[in-house]
Image (tube, rainbow, N blue to C red):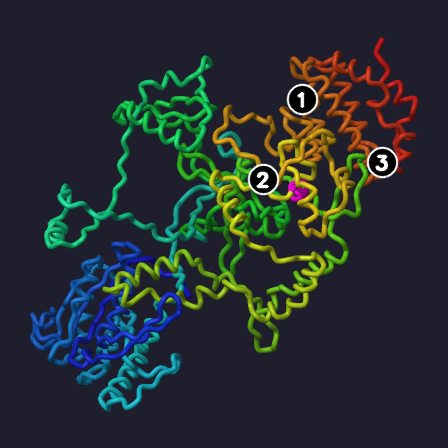
Amino acid sequence: MPAERAGYTVTMFLIDISPSMGDTRMVDIEGPDGESVSVEMSNLEWSLQFAKLKIQEMIFNGRKTDQCGVITFGSEETDNTINSKNGGYEHVSEYIPIGQPNAGTLAKVDRLQPSTVSGDPIDALIVGIETQAEYLASKKSWTRKIVLITDGKSPIELEDWEATAGKMNAFDIHFTIIGVDFDDEELPYAEPDKPHIKRTNETFFHTFASKLTSGIVGNCALALQETSRPDIRQVKSALTGTLLRLGDVETRAEEALEINVKTSKCTALGRPKSWKKYAKREHGAKEGASEDEDMEEESGKNVYTSLKMRSEYYVDPNEGDSEGEDGDVKMEPVDDENDEVENKAKLNENLEKVEKEQLVRGFKYGTTYTPCPDGQFPRLSTQKGIDICGFFPAKNFRRELAMGEIQYIWADPGSPRQQVALSSIVQAMYEKNVMAIARWVSRDGMDPKMGVLAPTVFDKVDCFLWSQMPFADDVRKYTFASLDRLVNKKGEIVTEHPFIPTGEQIDAMDEFVDAMDLMEAGERDEEGNRYPWFDTRLSYNPAIHRTKQAMFHCAIVSDIEKNPLPPPHPDLLKYFNPPRRVLKNAREAIEQCKNAFKIKQGTYTKHSSQKSRKARKDGHVHGQDDDNTMLLLDRKPGSKTPQTTSKDKATSGSDTEDDDDDDEMLLDKPKPADEPRGNDRPLPTPARSLSPDIDLGRAPGRIVGTTYPLADFQRGLAIDDLGVVITEIVLKPFTSRRTAELLECMEAMRKIHWMYDILYTGKINAWNVFLQQLRDKCINGQPGNLAFWSQITATGRSMSLISDTEAQKQGGSSRITDLESEEFIAPRI
């Protein structure tokens, strides 16, 4: 479907209010839980729901260029532009002039009632065409739509209807006829005992619509059903001009390239409409109230008024008393929530109101604030445009890091030379299968964005697709313990353990994943092959469309209790549950997984529910099983972690627990023998931290920090990171205070280092290279650290290079001999 320009549309609703539209009918309304309720209403009330839904959508979009008008036929009075000039066209009235709709428009449509005279729909159509043409006389590029709502029981004058159809085609009018109880094969529906006049009119409407360039006749029931279907409208995005630069156009212009380009949106993030808060207005509080609200209040009705945000600023005159000697804010513990409420109440009594002009904006820096009188710090001196910084293979693009919306980068449509220049770059990148790293500045002085440009080749045009990428500061790297590999305290790799999946478990999970494959779970094509079950083009955001459906329903229904919100459209729920065919095929694989993993259904108790709520109250969720903590951290918890009693182990029913030998299977410090064993209740979480967070000294992308290097290393086993951190600390001043800690780090690093080298390469290399570089920096570097290297040599051979003899004992090899290892660690004379 080609994209259309959003807004810039005038829709004329031609509504039949002839006596036959007052006939009543029973309408089955489906409630939110699927229950069916029958409601009696007239044909006019029922069909007006379609018009009100369409008007409500215009209000929902909020575009001034989305306008509509309402013309009634069958009205007892006559009021239209043709009648006032030339006479005729009786019983046709311009009920609502063309304009941007609002809540008053819906209220006025609700007041329509059947009349006592009949009207000609062709007369109403001609009046609608003329009224629309007069309004759009100077707006020829606007889209014109006409919607005719009728039951088809009024007499029609069929003279010269072909001329009317020709004029509609000349104006390119989109014409829709919504018929009450019209026959429809798609629904399907065929009205029994249809009157002769209605059958004749219905046939004429189909003939008339077939003569139009854009004409359609539909059943009212089907039309109302389709209004709740999730609909994605493709709209045109406005082009924005900028420059694409390759190279330095200022200092080396002869080697640089600058192209005039246009940008437009390829995708746009959709959000549900925001809700506004209303509160019941108290009696007597009439300040700022409208006359209608005052009249409603005097009549005894509850009046609700919208809540508006208002900011007031207060300062504590005793704020200086809460700072310590160093100027930081004192952090004091809070015993319980009651004390905190009392403290807040006392604080509010001492506050003094200040005006916004007296305040200075500041940024938090630790426990203090840095003032910024200008509201923000000076921006970078940037220049508008897109600068290509470099190229990289497209296979190295990390799709999971793409951020935000996608933009098109087009060449200037009015310059063939610019189009050729951009096309040549796109074609070259497309053939080389590379992407570009680019820096985008939307306006001079604005903050730059980094992203990638992907070459895109369409049938008749070449362009780029822009995707914003995060800076290094925006990326967070998390490390997790291996799920299939464990190392004990002795440095040995454990192959069998309750935490390591067995071959049977791996095979069972593989079969389960294969059985849940959705790529061949959809409908069959003409050749019998199945399509994929999931299609992103048919997957809609429930938050957006369900909110929209609720708002539209409340706008067109006067009593929400008698006419409740219907359930969501089936298309909105299409991907909520996996397909039954896949679930049926996966039953056997699911049973295999249950048997292999010994899965048992847990029991729910009131005690566990209360404990869970208590744990969530302060934002923490405490693990109830000591083994789960070991599995996640890949090491035994410290003394502060609650231990599981022997009684709990005996009654837990777990099939993955072994004897006490498991305590030595994971990396950890030995547990003190006299450590008391507590119950399984979690320790209380402090209500408030008594000191600010400690800086772990981790550089971006690094797991091991300079504050607790050994603990970080044992948690993540980041060998390269630990070597960098040790070198960094050694070369800093006052290293002597941490000599023992650094030697302990090196001892742990040496033990793990050669084990990894043997496991992956069979050769000892990494530790020896690290130690040689450390020695060179300590002895020959500036500032160096001879004292620390002396401490290393004092430890002897155990801290020296790994020789070939030592490596062979573990099944590896090394280029260092025993003599070289001894000479390397020998004290300097």
The answer to the question of whether label 3 and label 2 lie on touching residues, with beta carbons closer than 8 A, is no
Q: Nearer the viewer, residue 128 or 662?
A: 662
- Please give left or right for residue 324 compared with residue 438 in the image: left
Q: What residue type is labelled 3?
A: Lys
Picture disc at residue 763: 3
Majority secondary structure of the magenta segment?
Answer: helix
Q: Look at 9% across and 77% down and name the residue there.
A: 88
- Please give left or right for residue 745 compared with residue 242 in the image: right
Q: Which amino acid does label 2 sit on?
A: Arg
Q: Give the range drawn in magenta.
A: 626-632
Picture disc at residue 728: 1
Picture disc at residue 8: none
* Number of numbered tags placed on the structure image: 3
Question: Mark 3 or mark 2: which comes first in sequence?
Answer: 2
Q: Nearer the viewer, residue 562 or 603?
A: 603
Whether residue 505 is visible here, answered yes or no, is: yes
In which image quadrant can residue 590 be found?
bottom right
Q: Label 1: how many residues lie within 10 Å, few (<14), some (14-19) or many (20+)? A: few
Picture disc at residue 681: 2
* Residue 585 image offset from top left, x and y in percent: 64, 70
The answer to the question of whether label 1 and label 2 lie on touching residues, with beta carbons closer than 8 A, is no
Question: Mark 1 or mark 2: which comes first in sequence?
Answer: 2
Q: What residue type is labelled 1?
A: Glu
In which image quadrant can residue 562 be found?
bottom left
